[in-house]
Image: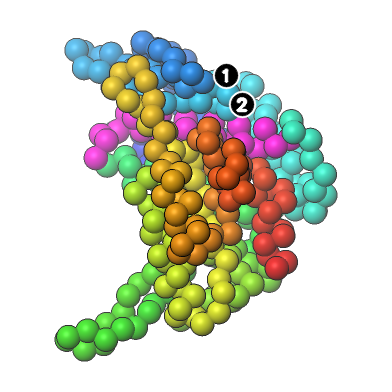
Amino acid sequence: MNPLALELKTKKSTLLEFSITTKNVLQFLQYMTSDTTYAGDYRISKQKNDGTEKFMRPINTKFFIADPNNFQMNFNKLLDILDRIKSRSLDFLDEDLLIIDSVLYTIQQSIGAGFDLLVASNSSRKHVGNRFEELVRCVFSEIGIEHKHTVLQIPYEAESGKKVYKCENDLILSPYSKVRSTGSSLDEREIVVSVKTTSKDRMGKMFIDKMLLERFVKHPQKVIGIFLNDVQRKEEHAVSFTLVSGLFMVYTQFLTPLEGIYYLDPPPNALKIPLSNHMGTFSQLITKDVFRLLAS
């Protein structure tokens, strides 16, 4: 197996590990042969090799840091910002927020692009999703917020007797020194987090899960979503956005509101009213909203 492909498939537990892999991918991308077109802010590239073509996922040029040296410089700035968040010095400039979103976006999209070009697509999707969950966990560790993955087991009656529905929670964020939610209960002050690379085909499940969780634990439960983006390549030279905004607002008004949806690369309508009342950037979450939610 290609050494870089093996590195991409390896579980990551620190931001330093992510930065090393990112720089290796960025260097690889600099020397690959590709055709590139642009659709708005998005770059669509493909690699031609031995008569075959491989497309890379759309890359938002507003956030992606293509130069390895520039990435390292901004990565160092990110570590400083995260250290300030950990000490709860929460006065940030717009430039700081952009660094948070840009560096983390570059890390995740570098990993995704590496998989696009080096690994068969049928085996890469789960790895890309796993790396994103690991990246988000690393960020919350860096800013001093306790967290863990949980599976809430909900018993129910079936024809064959008692069964258990397993409701998997990607992440539980806690205001305490140790997460108190367990496999049989959720702490009301903790936040249930869904961490996915896209909301496509998943957004509705978040609303249903929140209703189910609250019915089972018998108290209100805070639920948020963290997504990389909601964009996909359309044919060879265009992109389309996959956030179904009307359905989101219907679920919000007639099922139950979520406590927030946060993107590294928000779709254009996510930051416009009325969606902006419910959606924001990942930098907004970790510099402001998460502390408000944990205190409520």
Give the residue drawn at x 41%, y 33%: 241
Name the kind of residue labelled 1 in the image: Asp
Left or right: 289 in relation to 230: right
* Viewer-side residue, 207 vs 124: 207
Name the residue beneath numbered marker 2: 71
What stretch of residues is rendered in magenta? 96-122
Name the kind of residue labelled 2 in the image: Phe
Residue 234 at x, y percent in the picture: 32, 25
Please identify the quadrant where the C terminus is shown. Answer: bottom right
Q: Do residues under tags 1 and 2 come within 8 Å of each other at their CB atoms?
A: yes
Q: How is the image coloured?
A: rainbow
Under circle 1, the secondary element is loop
Question: Does the magenta stretch mainly form a helix, a strand or a loop?
Answer: helix
91 to 5, vertically: above or below? below
194 to 5, vertically: above or below? below
* Viewer-side residue, 245 vs 34: 245
Residue 166 at x, y percent in the picture: 35, 72
Residue 48 at x, y percent in the picture: 28, 13
Give the residue drawn at x 46%, y 62%: 254
Name the residue beneath numbered marker 1: 67
